[in-house]
Image: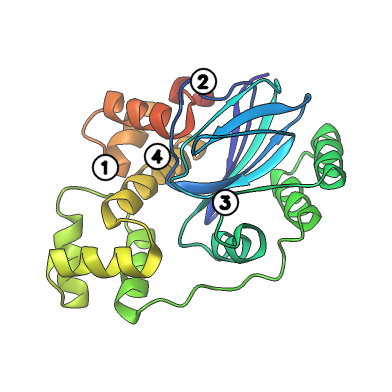
Amino acid sequence: MKPQLFYFRDHMLFLTDTEPSSSHRHLASHLIFSLEGETEWNIDGEQINCRGIYIDANAEHIGKGGGKFLSLLFVKTSSYAHTMEKKFLQGKSYFILDEKTVEDVVELVNQQFEDPEILNRRILETCMVTDLEKPMYDERVQKTITMIEMKETIDSNTIAELSRHVCLSQSRLSHLFKAETKMSLAGYLAFEKLRKTYCYLMQGESITASCMKAGFDTPSHCAATCRKMFGLSLSKLKK
């Protein structure tokens, strides 16, 4: 199956036929559905077999088997991640979805919606993730998140620029951001930089132009980040 990616404002949807072959962590929380049988998961050292699972950000994991996968990745600061953390996790690093939910999602994928937004919405409705609860952050953290979303490029001067904008030192802003969101500011910037790269790719930009516009030093750095975070090749997605 050709890898596919669909970008929405605060999350991404992947359709792939592989999972990364080594244990890894994501900077995003994610829903994963195996479309062809069970997957054997190892999550933070615990062995699990299932077809559908929600995994929290930064939980170390590896999956084997299952064939084709559908994954939805949610940035930690989004309303989706905040809602699902309260709904599913309750202090754990993962939650196994029931078989009926998984079967309904697989059926939706097999219907091959022409509009990915409809597929995305129907999947979230099936998982009963509709009544979203927006996270409440310190005003300075919220201003930081908004400013990052609005920036076209994230570069080496971004943290200094953000610090001036909210009238905090760089170290104080980084500490406050981590305390409020449970995600490091540097990690969030890395995720946003990659997300912006995908956005530019979907708009028709070349791989090189997309990487540089988002703020990566080189396309190879972007490719390594992509492979490390998602186990996917930028070139395959572009094709």
Mark sitting earlier along the chain (1/4): 4
Q: Quadrant of residue 167?
A: bottom left
Q: CA gap, disc 4 to disc 2?
A: 14 Å
Q: Secondary structure at mark 2?
A: helix
Quadrant of the image containing the N terminus: top right
Q: CA gap, disc 1 to disc 4?
A: 8 Å
Q: Quadrant of residue 112?
A: top right
Mark sitting earlier along the chain (1/2): 1
Q: CA gap, disc 3 to disc 1?
A: 20 Å
Identified by mark 2, the residue type is Lys
Bin the neighbour count of mark 4 within 10 Å (Cα to Cα): few under 14, some 14-19, many 20 and up.
many
Q: Quadrant of residue 173?
A: bottom left
Relative image position of residue 93 (x, y in whole percent): 54, 50
Q: Secondary structure at mark 4?
A: helix
Relative image position of residue 232 (x, y in whole percent): 49, 26
Mark sitting earlier along the chain (3/2): 3
Bin the neighbour count of mark 2 within 10 Å (Cα to Cα): few under 14, some 14-19, many 20 and up.
few
168 relative position to 120: left or right: left
Identified by mark 1, the residue type is Gly
- Which residue is disc 4 drawn over? 197
Q: CA gap, disc 1 to disc 2?
A: 21 Å
Viewer-side residue, 126 vs 10: 126
Mark sitting earlier along the chain (3/1): 3
Residue 130 higher or lower than 102, as above or below: below
- Which residue is disc 2 drawn over? 236
Q: Residue at x 70, y 20 (%)?
A: 67
57 relative position to 110: left or right: left
Viewer-side residue, 139 vs 21: 21
Q: Secondary structure at mark 3?
A: loop
Identified by mark 3, the residue type is Phe
Residue 109 higher or lower than 207, as above or below: below
